[in-house]
Amino acid sequence: MREAENIELYYSESATVKVKLTAKKMLEFANGNQEFPEGLYMEFFNEAGKMTSTLRANEAIYTKEQDVWRGRGDVEIKSIENNQQLNTEELFWKPDQERMYTDKFVTIKLPDQVLYGRGLTAKQDFSSYEITEPEGIFYLEDE
């Protein structure tokens, strides 16, 4: 097992930074799993290198075998491009699929309304999402 403090990690594809991760503390285990007991903050970037969204969680775990991240506690995603914010108590991220999901209660704040529901599937940059069981009043645009 290894332990690191005040870390900053970058994930890239084809020499392009896709994700920047910062955390106060990281524990890495022999099986490749990682734990962030004091939380983490992530920034997601598009192909042009522009930050598209951020993710913050009170604690997180990365399971190497399944290549899945799990954020817990107060999990928050902000979409910079769409001016939207997601809050939930647990969120999973599959980097290989560029997808996030949860079966927990979610709140999505839009510029002009707030959406509620249980369960969500979203692109990792939060540019599109689907609430599994939406609740409340919704405003729909006519096309």
Image: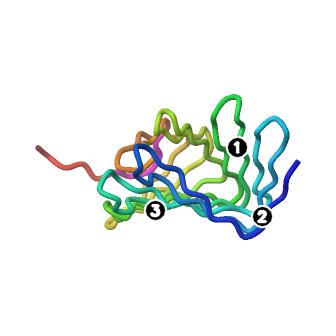
**What's the magenta bit mostly, secondary-structure-wise?**
loop
Q: Position of residue 125 (x, y in %)?
A: 41, 51
Q: Secondary structure at mark 3?
A: strand
Task: Based on the picture, tell me whether residue 135 belongs to the magenta stretch.
Answer: yes
Neighbours of disc 3 within 10 Å: few (<14), some (14-19), many (20+): many
Pointer 3 or 2: first along the chain: 2
Q: Nearer the viewer, mark 3 or mark 2?
A: 2
* CA–CA distance in space, label 3 to label 2: 23 Å
Tag 2 residue:
25
Q: Position of residue 101 (x, y in %)?
A: 54, 39
Q: Which mark is residue 12?
A: none
* CA–CA distance in space, label 3 to label 1: 21 Å
Pointer 3 or 1: first along the chain: 1
Which residues fall within the magenta stretch?
134-138
Three-letter amino acid code at the position of disc 3: Lys
Tag 3 residue:
78
Q: Is residue 82 above or below residue 120?
A: below
- Residue, x 76% and y 47% (percent of image)? 34
- Residue, x 80% and y 48% (percent of image)? 28
Q: Position of residue 26 (x, y in %)?
A: 77, 58
Q: Quadrant of the C terminus?
A: top left
Tag 1 residue:
62
Q: Residue 99 versus residue 17: which sits nearer the camera? A: 17
Q: Is residue 26 above or below residue 111?
A: above
Identity of the residue furthest to the top in this view: 65
* CA–CA distance in space, label 2 to label 1: 13 Å
Neighbours of disc 2 within 10 Å: few (<14), some (14-19), many (20+): some
Q: Nearer the viewer, mark 3 or mark 1?
A: 1
